[in-house]
Image (spheres, grey):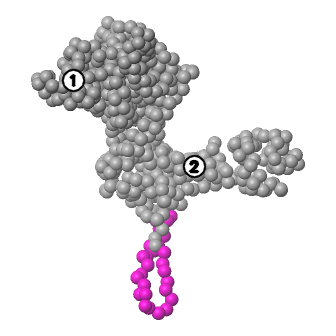
Amino acid sequence: MARSAPTVAYKPKPGEIPTNPGVYRFRDADGRVLYVGKAKNLRARLSNYFAPLHTLHERTRRMVTTAASVEWTVVDSDVDSLQLEYMWIKEFDPPFNVRYRDDKSYPFMAITLADEAPRVIVTRNRRIPGAKYFGPYPKVWAVHDTIDLMIKVFPIRTCSDSSYKKAMASGRPCFPGQIGRCGGPCSMKVSIEEHRAIVEDFISFMAGSDQRFAKELNARMREASAAMDYEAAATYRDRLQAIDAVLSKSALVLAPDTDADLFGIAEDELAAAVQHFVIRGGRVRGVRATTIEKELDISGGDLVDQVLQRTYGNAVGADIPKQVLVPAMPDDAADLEEWLRERRGKSVTIQIAQRGRKADLMRTATLNAQQALMLHKTRRTSDYLARTQALTDLQEALDLAEAPLRIECFDVSHLGGTNVVASMVVFEDGLPRKDQYRSFGVPETTDDTDSIYQVLRRRLAYLDRPEEAEPAPVEPTADGEVVTERRRARFAYRPQLLVVDGGKPQVEAAARALRDAGHEEVALCGIAKRLEEVWLPGEEYPVILPRTSEALYLLQRLRDEAHRFAITYQRKRRRRDIQSVLAEVPGLGDARIKALLRHFGSVAALKQATPAEMSELPGVGPKLAAAIHSHLSGG
């Protein structure tokens, strides 16, 4: 009788899991919640986790085997499961759910609504009780400029709490009020109730009602002018100019009645960056940047689902726009729309920005997200403390005798099995040493593993070259011939760790090269791109580094840099190769070769061109064009 494939011991019995919608939790042996998820059908979803372990995604397998139990709660509707999932993730902070890191470097404009007389301030603190926030803004001065213009139209309080209390107790205006920089009750010009009404107008304007205020001020200015109250008309005119100045700082990118939130997302296997553009009245009012660290295999619509839950979990009313623009549609988009409608009190639509200005803005947001993701990963590997931690983590994870201060990473690149090249990049103390990068051509090979073997044998051969002594000190007054000796070539420095781009087959090929070269003392590992697994020679299963591991970020950077360098070298060779081929054509010099490649844009386009198309180029006649075409086509 065949034995069933192994799974975990706590797998529920058949029929125990209900088919209702609900929320489930995985716990470890100590009762800690490891992961929270929701499902339209609990039985269908949970059965995915209890498939044979060898069929699971590596990171899902790690979560399932770390857990000791699973429990679930049935709810009435899919919308209820959204709410419960959000509450539990917030309460338990499970390590296998996505983690968010808001970019705290950007300042906000905040209105302290919980105060008796709310004031407007610039802050990076997002936890002021009862405060209403706008932004963030890319620069502090941009917030101050906006406030300076806004208080000309809506004069609200700007002074400190201590100044406010002193002024209200003494009956004398606060100092900012005396110089026209504060319009609160402490200026002795308005009551608390009147000031509260101005604050409401301030918030309404910032939330997108700018056109209404512009029309109202324009009408009042005309009325005052018609009544020959020119002083009042001038005041309204100044306020209109201030409004125009504020609006000119925020370009109109969409239709004036557009209230939307747009999310641009860039991601890889372990992290994602989100750029949240807040659009009110057709203008981008703020941009919020978030970095997400992923543990389980989550991407596309599922990631959008988590981002929207995180963004609107505590939002109500006007904080939620009527339109949400996303790069990929979540599976439960209809449930999310209903969830958002309940919070907003009005309908909300979730859409993909596919054309027009919205699509253009989505591309801008996505580009910003890609740059933010790259910056996030680069900062992790360039910071001194992070680099030190990365090398220590790598030493422990790979069971090395010492920290790998010099790491060399190899990548093989080819075009459909032809034009095979390889690259070697060097990191010392966690930083790239570009002066020591090397490229290799591989004239004959059977596959990637053979290429890895060849390249490593060639590289390791340098370790066996005799030591080249340091030059002896020269006595400047000595007679006779002075002989200088070369220092040891940098290529001969011994690495503590070799990294290859690939999984088990590539690592075994590299291990064979180390054995045959007699250098098994050099540590070796491989990093497989799809699952970001770290493979060691002779091991049946990979090493899985935590998503927050500095070591994993360092290995990723090494692998990505080796891949970039290999591609760059391959492109240079291709350009060199085609120029060499074209140079064999009689009558075709360097200038015309460059002109041909520049005109057609690529080697492939040149090879596809007809003699007639080639002869359109100045200096290339019909006879020369025919010769070029014949040579390229092998005729």
Q: Mark 1: which amino acid?
A: Ser
Secondary structure mostly seen in the magenta stretch: loop
Left or right of 13, for residue 214: right
Residue 277: quadrant of the picture: top left
Query: Is residue 79 placed above or below 285 in the rendered structure?
Result: above
Secondary structure beneath dot 1 equals helix
Residue 102 point in image, percent of width and height: 33, 32
Real-space CA distance between mark 2 and mark 1, rounded to the nearest whole angstrom? 66 Å
Residue 422 point in image, percent of width and height: 55, 52
The residue labelled by disc 1 is: 187
Whether residue 250 is visible, yes or no, is no
Residue sitting nearer the eye, 583 or 516? 583
Q: Residue furthest left?
A: 169
Residue drawn 33% across the image and 12% down it: 317
The residue labelled by disc 2 is: 568
Residue sitting nearer the eye, 71 or 471? 471
Query: Is residue 616 placed above or below 260 in the rendered structure?
Result: below
Residue 137: quadrant of the picture: top left
Query: Is residue 358 placed above or below 502 in the rendered structure?
Result: above
Left or right of 533, for residue 450: right
Which stretch did the figure color magenta? 461-486
Q: Is residue 474 magenta?
A: yes
Residue drawn 34% across the image and 48% down it: 383
Residue sitting nearer the eye, 70 or 280? 280
Residue drawn 50% across the image and 30% down it: 364
Secondary structure beneath dot 2 equals helix
